[in-house]
Amino acid sequence: MTDTGTGTQTAPAAPPSLGRKVGSAARWSLINTVVMRLGNFATGIILARYFLGPEAWGVYGIAQTVLLVLLSANELGVSLAIVRWEGDPRRFAPTVLTLSAVSSCLLYAVLFATAPAVADVLGSPEASGVLRVMCLCVVLDGLSQVPAGFLTREFAQGRRMAVDALNFVLSTAVTLFLAVQGWGAMSFAWGSVVGNVAALIGCCLAAPGTLRFGWDREQARALLKFGLPLAGASMLALGVVNVDTMVVGSTLDPLALGFYVLAFNISGWPVRIISEAARRVSFAGFSRLADSPQALAAGFSRALGVVTAATVPLCVLLAALAAPVIELVYGARWLPAAGALPWLMALGLVRIGCELAYDCLVAIGRRRSLIAVQGLWLVLLIPALVIGARGGGIVGVAQGHVVIAGAVVVPVFLLALHRGGIPLATVARACAWPLLGGTVMAAILLVLERYLGDSLPALLATAAAGTLAYAVCLLPARKTLRG
């Protein structure tokens, strides 16, 4: 990889301590993600049960979708150079920060001007004001990319957890206070802004001296050459995940949008808890192994096996017990969301594997493959979702997602990994036992729910029996998963 400040360098062999660093960072990252997501989960329950109805959730879903798409390209992909490039990152970090800040401000300016039109096209004109406030996070995120990148590069997930805790506490407090005051979806927007301000300050304190602006034309040229393809692939990836909200908003009514947003958020619990924790260290770890095909294949296999093993039981539980879980947690008025949830849980499992593959392909420089895969996914997905929405409502949208992901995207990702040096047999071995265990678990859950009912004690007993069966099925793979 070329570092314009130091010339072309060959990445050194991974130091002996790399495994310990990655392991420690992964543990901190998992703890961080689980704690934060459980907190968000509890907050969401309070808001959905007592303060916000499906219509407000629909407005929030539209604003969150637009924000995520903008965040995928707000720093033009150049911040990943902080993690990936060899040499001293402080030599080119000021140029990265300048590029990130300028592009973020320009994106927000465009969004501010077009917010009414965007909200109207997406079938939620009342989301205009929420968009303008929530997307201030684009600018704040752009400024925090460099200090956050240093924390990732150094595997400093303990400090990252402190930053995220500060973000969560302040954003949650503001959101709940405003929701109680009757601010509706706008409470999410201001809560997000306050949390991102806190995160920016926290990142700067955790990585001191990294928030410095500067400019070097040669560095900027190299950074854009490196980052723009990644930003394009990232935007396509976020488009894939969020285009369904746009389709539901523009095709169905606001009530259906609220139910769909809730179901999609529930399906994202395993993705956010497991995949988010893994991705905070996977890219840096794969980058260190990129020059050794055998080490990379072994590292990817182990990571995929661990992530799949941890995710499958969560996905199966939420898919098999969708209706009773939603009624128990959110209340009976949210039951229409249960029809889409099993399909979205299947999609969530696919997303976790694809996101890990995405990080691996980025680390080995297969940016063109990523753009091709994500572009194909989005092009095929949009008509499938429109057809599904018109024919089956939110359930049809969820089914369209699964059909395209399973029939087209997974095989294409497997081919891209194979060309990148990850044999298909390696992927199959990593996933075999978790998927077998998930099948057995699903059968047990469905049978027990039918005979025991859906009271709270029955659900707990059913979940315990299914989880135990899954653990037994995973016993033959325990040595592999431990690495």
Image (spheres, grey):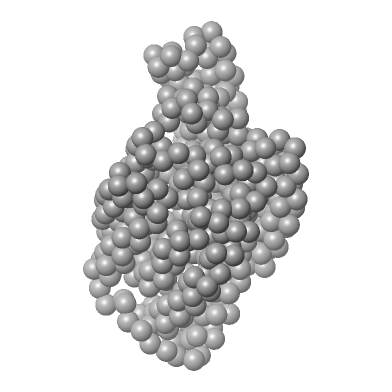
Q: Is residue 481 above or below residue 251?
A: above
Residue in front for this viewpoint, 338 or 457: 338
Q: Is residue 382 above or below residue 222?
A: above
Q: Is residue 464 left or right of residue 297?
A: left
Is residue 68 visible in the rendered image? The answer is: no
User: Residue 406, image x and y in percent?
Assistant: 69, 42
Residue at left offset 31%, top offset 77%: 211
User: Residue 134, image x and y in percent?
Assistant: 42, 61
Q: Is residue 381 left or right of residue 442?
A: right
User: Residue 314, image x and y in percent?
Assistant: 48, 33
Q: Is residue 188 left or right of residue 268?
A: left
- Count of numbered badges drawn on the protein: 0
Residue in front for this viewpoint, 19 or 235: 235
Q: Is residue 452 left or right of residue 163?
A: right
Report the quarter where the C terminus lies: top left
User: Residue 51, image x and y in percent?
Assistant: 37, 39
Residue in front for this viewpoint, 378 or 282: 378
Q: Is residue 358 above or below residue 10?
A: above
Is residue 48 visible in the rendered image? The answer is: yes
Residue at left offset 35%, top offset 61%: 193
Residue at left offset 49%, top offset 70%: 112
Residue at left offset 38%, top offset 87%: 214
Residue placed farthest to the top in the image? 451
Residue in front for this viewpoint, 3 or 333: 333
